[in-house]
Amino acid sequence: MKPHAVFRLVTKHALNALGYRDLALADLTPPIVVIGPDDFALENAYRVALQVAAEADTLAHASRMFDRGFSTVQEFVDFLKQFSDAEQLVSGLSDQSRLLFNSQWSGPLVEQIGRYAKEEVESKIQLPEGGVTDIILL
């Protein structure tokens, strides 16, 4: 990960943690909030197990979004390649409520995809021919 991306993530998570300040500082035993290291970064076996579970969840969610089954992540990726822009992707969804970028965003999904691409993706990658595919997979 590029240094500016790491800085952005650390800053984002630090600001999120500040939202729990009062709970974290409450004089209670046991504490309500504990901010500690992520096992994902520490143990390879945990990372692998999490990856397997995340892929299964991704495929189940994608199957519901598009009302068709996907056996592998690669099959899902190949399916997404047919969508060359946000309008095509949105029109291909059978359940638009399942495509969520930020629970606080409103407006048409096409606009949310554009916003996500600008705010979250643009600084990280150069969109190749796949365009929309890369946005969905990030």
Image: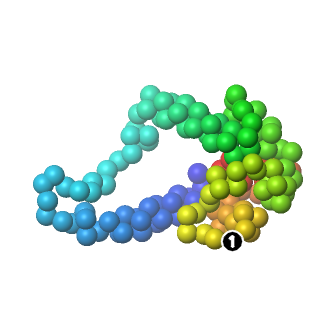
Q: Secondary structure at mark 1?
A: loop
Q: Quadrant of residue 81?
A: top right
| Left or right: 46, with 53 as reference point | left
At label 1, counting other C-alpha atoms closer than 10 Å, the crowd grade (few under 14, some 14-19, many 20 or more) is: few
The residue nearer to you, when weighing 135 against 61, is: 61
Does any portion of residue 114 appear in the rendered image?
no
> Would you say 137 lies left or right of 78 here?
left
Give left or right: position of 19 versus 6.
Answer: left
Is 122 located above or below residue 42 in the figure? below
Q: Which residue lies under the disc numbered 1?
A: 107
Q: Please provide percent x and percent y for residue 106.
A: 63, 71
Percent across and percent down for residue 44 are 45, 31
Q: Nearer the viewer, residue 118 or 81?
A: 81
Horizontal arrangement in the rendering, residue 13 relative to residue 57 (left or right): left
Residue at x 69%, y 71% (from the top left corner): 107
Report the front residue among 77 and 107.
107
Residue beneath the point at 25% across and 70% down: 22
Q: Percent x, y for residue 101? A: 62, 60
Who is closer to the viewer here, 114 or 97?
A: 97
Residue 110 in view:
yes
